Image (tube, helix red, strand yellow):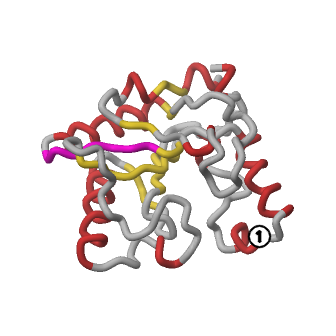
Amino acid sequence: MARAKLTDLTTAVPGARFDLRYATSNNFTRAVLPGYGTARPLLRREAAAALAQVERELETKGLGLKVWDAYRPVRGTLGMVAWCEKNHRTDLLDQGYIARRSRHNQGVAIDLTVVDLRTGSELDMGTPFDEFSERAHTANATGLQAANRALLGDAMRRAGFVNYMDEWWHFSFEVPDPMPFDLSLEQW
């Protein structure tokens, strides 16, 4: 079912850049997450089409998207939960920064930012990706950082995405028949 419902974002959103952190050790766990042996950005087809709309809109402003995470196999989420428990960081679970069941598992959630197409530089959003603090809450920014978060949020909303307000980078897209998948990215 995952193969029928998901699509590869490198094809669906060809202008986007990808830095799939959980397929590397450059993430909060300092290890590749289970199911991420290959860096492959997948998303439900409906969400990918909406993301392509966001990419086209931003491109008219000389901007583009950089994706950090999209579809996440269930085993990847379980790996995050296990890391929290092993490292005595269940506060991240309790506060909602790490989900025990994630919309990423359904292929309808995406973590991303905006980049300047000319330089490739990320716009200043005030915190890095996966900063688990109130500073990363979407509304907790001022000045240029607030304007940049609004730029991303407004473009994503116009395409039908909803922001998770505790993480400025996290958006979800509603689809009919959402279901979790555990297809590893190597199996795609």
**In the figure, 173 relative to 10: above or below?**
below
| Residue 58 relative to residue 93: left or right | left
- Residue that extends furthest to the right in the rendered view of this protein: 86
What is the x, y in percent for residue 123?
30, 58
- Residue that extends furthest to the left in the rendered view of this protein: 60
**Quarter of the N terminus within the rendering:** top right
What is the x, y in percent for residue 142?
30, 79
Task: Please name the residue that numbered disc 1 is placed on.
Answer: 89
The question of residue 66 being in magenta is answered with: yes
What is the x, y in percent for residue 33?
71, 43
**In the figure, 15 relative to 94: above or below?**
above
Q: Residue at x 73, y 74 (%)?
A: 91
Kind of residue at badge 1: Arg
Where does the magenta region start and end?
61-67
Q: Residue at x 22, y 37 (%)?
A: 56
Q: Residue at x 55, y 61 (%)?
A: 130
Q: Main secondary structure of the magenta part?
A: strand
What is the x, y in percent for residue 25?
65, 45
In the depicted view, which residue is nearer to us: 23 or 147? 23
Determine which quarter of the picture holds residue 39: top right
